[in-house]
Image (cartoon, grey):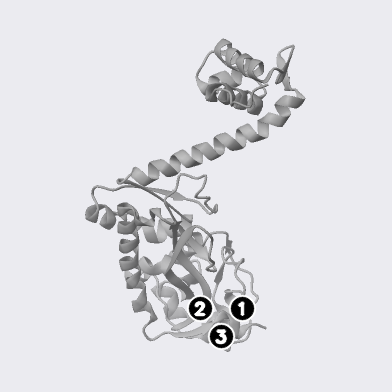
Amino acid sequence: MSDRLPPLTALRAFDAAARHMSFAKAASELNVTPAALSFQIKSLEEHLEAPLFRRLNRAVELTDAGRALAPGAADGFTALAAAWRAARRTVDQKSLIVTAGPAFTAKWLAPRLFNFAVANPDIELRFLATLRLVDFAHDDVDVAIRFGMAKDEPGLFSMPIIREWVAPMMTPELAEQFPNPADLARAPLLHQDDTHFLTPAVDWPAWFRAAKLPPRFAAGARFSQADHAIDAALAGAGVVLGRVSLAERDLKEGRLVMPYKLGLTTDAQYSFVCPEGPDERPQVQAFREWIEAETLSLEEYRDGTTFVHAAEVQV
């Protein structure tokens, strides 16, 4: 028996058939006829000098040899596909695929995309709004905007772009009803779960401790996403402990205000992340420089604000 590898097309046919456990479904995936797929698998079995499938009535099952080959074949084609995507990205000078969380995409990135498009008309920009942690080795993504505690990851370039902080935000009408921090004892509070993974906690109890006010445990509307909580605050439903990055446009245009000038800080931050090496591709570099410039507008909201780190007010 020769150690020479069989033809790639035959291995591809086997991989599809092993995943589907159906020659017909595998043929459909590969856009060939069942007869052609069966021929490829037969040639692979002849190369191995052993059967890979047991042909049953309207079904197939893997033999011992097939079960030994299937995981490696699947991993091999996954790795080959990832390598091909990586190779294509190195020569692609026009497209840019960026992923970020849904809230950050909707509230911060999306309203600014026109400015980037005007400044970079030759770059085709695509956004994937998801909370799933991207795997650059397997996902077709060039840049990720991540929120959380900074950490070094081998093979990745990471640059902090926004150090997040929160403060009570509300409509101007509600601010007239609750002009002082102590007035929040009777205000409707909005809660959000998207920062529950942070340690120490960045939430209403922590902010009340930072303000040296009695704790408040009143129930209120709770949201899984920060942008939904901000939208509720915009509707006048209550006071949100808003993240300044997500509420910036609403603060700038006066739909929300921060009357108390007391912010709660955290070590969590937004980071610009991409694979090392390709980070100098022209479109990646252009996007990084643009996003650095855009984040400077957040600094104006620090003026006159007193900050307390969440770690300083833990129980």
CA distance separating discs 2 and 3: 10 Å
- Report if the CB atoms under discs 2 and 3 are less than 8 Å apart: no
Mark 1 packing: few (<14 Cα in 10 Å), some, or many (20+)?
some
Residue for badge 1? 205
Image quadrant of residue 60? top right
Image quadrant of residue 215? bottom right
Disc number for residue 278: none
Mark 2 packing: few (<14 Cα in 10 Å), some, or many (20+)?
many
Farthest residue toward the bottom? Answer: 212
Residue 102 in view in this figure? yes
In the figure, is residue 192 to the left or right of 281? Answer: right
From the viewer's side, name the closer residue of 206 and 185. Answer: 206
Q: Name the residue: 36% across, 83% down.
A: 303
Residue for badge 3? 210
Give the mark toward the camera: 2 or 3: 2
From the viewer's side, name the closer residue of 187 and 294. Answer: 294
Q: Name the residue: 63% across, 23% down.
A: 17
Q: Name the residue: 48% across, 59% down.
A: 156
From the viewer's side, name the closer residue of 9 and 166. Answer: 9
Mark closest to the chain's N terminus, 1 or 3: 1
Q: Name the residue: 51% across, 79% down.
A: 264
**Residue 257 to residue 94: above or below:** below
Amino acid type at circle 3 is Ala
Residue for badge 2? 265
